[in-house]
């Protein structure tokens, strides 16, 4: 039906053409981004890509060379940090060691002319929210790293800011606490409904926590999308490579979504880009995108693969395979331990597989 266009929900935060130069080095180049109210966004990228710089510019801890930061329709680009509306949690817990947990959490409220009883009520509420209801009288040194990070989170939320900024909040924790806190931050963020931006270089963290991931590289945004979008439909070779494991096969385009790899032709149903016959193309295939069941003469991309190595990792294993037809190119493929047994996948054996035609992605090969 030809109804009116839905009203545009105002962005909780808008980053407009932000650039940051450190002398002759550009840490950010013309970054544009809309952050929706209530969403959890992750800035993901390798070291030096500019994600921390972008977060610090949003916080007013760093000044952009050009561009604007608009929060709820208001230009905050030139406001000092204390006049902006956000709470922030850093990698190191950054609690005041000589204050109790309750005093740490209530720190931002003391100056706010709130009544003492109200402050106590709010602090108790926050400590319950982060699962530390009876730790108010303790000191930071008496808590584990994960508990201290929960306190930092409670402190950041105390004044009910419109935006929560998290700068690698889990990277100082051990593996177990990291995974536990991942789920908890996610639950808390949804419960409070606060718009959140988290910086991380850990792809698993971003995939498991974000509503949308912003993948950055060399000061530019490569792709913005849901975790599944980013993983299943990477927009660039960098995204395909950086998020998740991937096999890259060198090929030559034959036209009609067909590509020559070594002596075989692969069908690639998901290719959106048009390639001219003869183009050098890299085909990207995730380790899980192989079929071993229900293969028949109509199955595309079938291959007699020689297993050259099996890496046993528990329930999910990696088999490295090759084939004469691939002319030396190899693939790392995932198999469950059960498949390993059922299909007798071990070094030196040959297995019948198919590379999933609807999963292969194709990108132009870069000039060497
Ligand atoms: P990391 O995870 O290592 O912090 P990052 O993606 O967060 O990486 P940034 O910290 O934003 O990267 O830094 C982006 C680039 O800008 C880096 O090359 C860094 O060396 C440079 N940079 C950051 N701050 C400054 C500064 N104050 N002076 C000069 N260069 C800087």
Image (cartoon, grey):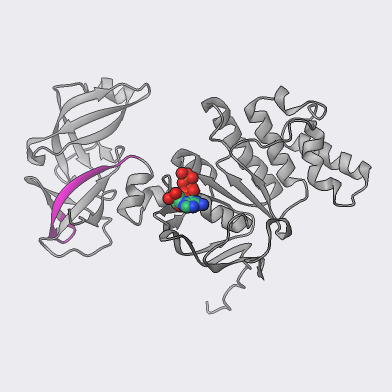
What residue is shown at x 20% (from left), y 21% (from top)? 346
Q: In the rendered image of this protein, does residue 366 appear above or below residue 134?
A: below
Magenta region's main secondary structure?
Answer: strand
Q: In the rendered image of this protein, does residue 230 appear above or below residue 320?
A: below
Q: Quadrant of residue 136?
A: top right
Span shown in magenta: 245-258
Expressed as whole percent of the image width and height from the top left, the position of residue 180 reads: 59, 30
What residue is shown at x 90% (from left), y 49% (from top)? 114
Horizontally, residue 175 falls left or right of residue 186, namely: left
Expressed as whole percent of the image width and height from the top left, the position of residue 30 reads: 45, 66
Q: Front-most of 254 and 132?
A: 132
Q: Front-most of 342 and 43?
A: 43
Q: Quadrant of residue 364?
A: bottom left
Q: Is residue 257 shown in magenta?
A: yes
Q: Is residue 82 shown in magenta?
A: no
Q: Front-most of 233 and 296?
A: 233
Expressed as whole percent of the image width and height from the top left, the position of residue 173 reads: 56, 30
* Farthest residue, direction front: 23
Residue 51 visible to the viewer? no
Q: Front-most of 253 and 139?
A: 139
Residue 297 visible to the viewer? yes
Expressed as whole percent of the image width and height from the top left, the position of residue 48 reads: 43, 48
Horizontally, residue 33 falls left or right of residue 247, namely: right
Q: In the rendered image of this protein, does residue 32 appear above or below residue 355?
A: below
Q: How many numbered dots are placed on residues in this image?
A: 0
């Amino acid at each position: 039906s030809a109804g009116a266009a839905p009203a545009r929900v105002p962005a909780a935060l808008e980053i407009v053409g932000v650039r940051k130069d450190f002398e002759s080095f550009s840490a950010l180049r013309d970054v544009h981004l809309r952050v929706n109210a209530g969403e959890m966004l992750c800035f993901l990228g390798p070291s030096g890509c500019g994600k921390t710089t972008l977060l610090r510019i949003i916080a007013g801890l760093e000044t952009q060379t050009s561009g604007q930061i608009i929060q709820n329709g208001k230009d905050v680009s030139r406001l000092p940090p204390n006049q902006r509306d956000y709470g922030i949690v850093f990698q190191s817990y950054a609690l005041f060691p000589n204050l109790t947990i309750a005093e740490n959490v209530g720190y931002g409220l003391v100056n706010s002319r709130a009544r003492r009883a109200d402050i106590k009520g709010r602090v108790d509420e926050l400590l319950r929210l982060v699962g530390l209801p009876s730790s108010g009288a303790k000191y930071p040194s008496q808590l584990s790293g994960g508990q201290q990070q929960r306190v930092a989170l409670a402190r950041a939320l105390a004044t009910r800011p419109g935006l929560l900024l998290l700068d690698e909040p889990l990277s100082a924790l051990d593996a177990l606490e990291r995974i536990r806190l991942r789920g908890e931050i996610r639950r808390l963020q949804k419960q409070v409904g606060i718009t959140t931006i988290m910086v991380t270089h850990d792809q698993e963290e971003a995939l498991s926590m974000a509503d949308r991931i912003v993948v950055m590289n060399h000061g530019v945004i490569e792709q913005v999308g849901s975790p599944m979008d980013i993983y299943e439909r990477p927009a660039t070779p960098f995204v395909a490579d950086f998020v998740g494991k991937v096999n890259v096969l060198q090929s030559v385009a034959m036209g009609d979504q067909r590509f020559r790899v070594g002596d075989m032709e692969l069908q690639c149903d998901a290719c959106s880009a048009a390639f001219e016959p003869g183009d050098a193309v890299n085909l990207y295939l995730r380790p899980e995108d192989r079929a071993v069941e229900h293969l028949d003469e109509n199955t595309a991309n079938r291959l007699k693969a020689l297993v050259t190595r099996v890496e046993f990792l528990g329930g999910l294993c990696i088999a490295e395979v090759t084939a004469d037809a691939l002319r030396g190119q190899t693939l790392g493929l995932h198999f469950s331990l059960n498949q390993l047994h059922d299909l007798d996948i071990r070094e030196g054996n040959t297995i019948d597989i198919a590379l999933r035609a609807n999963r292969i992605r194709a990108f132009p090969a870069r000039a060497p």
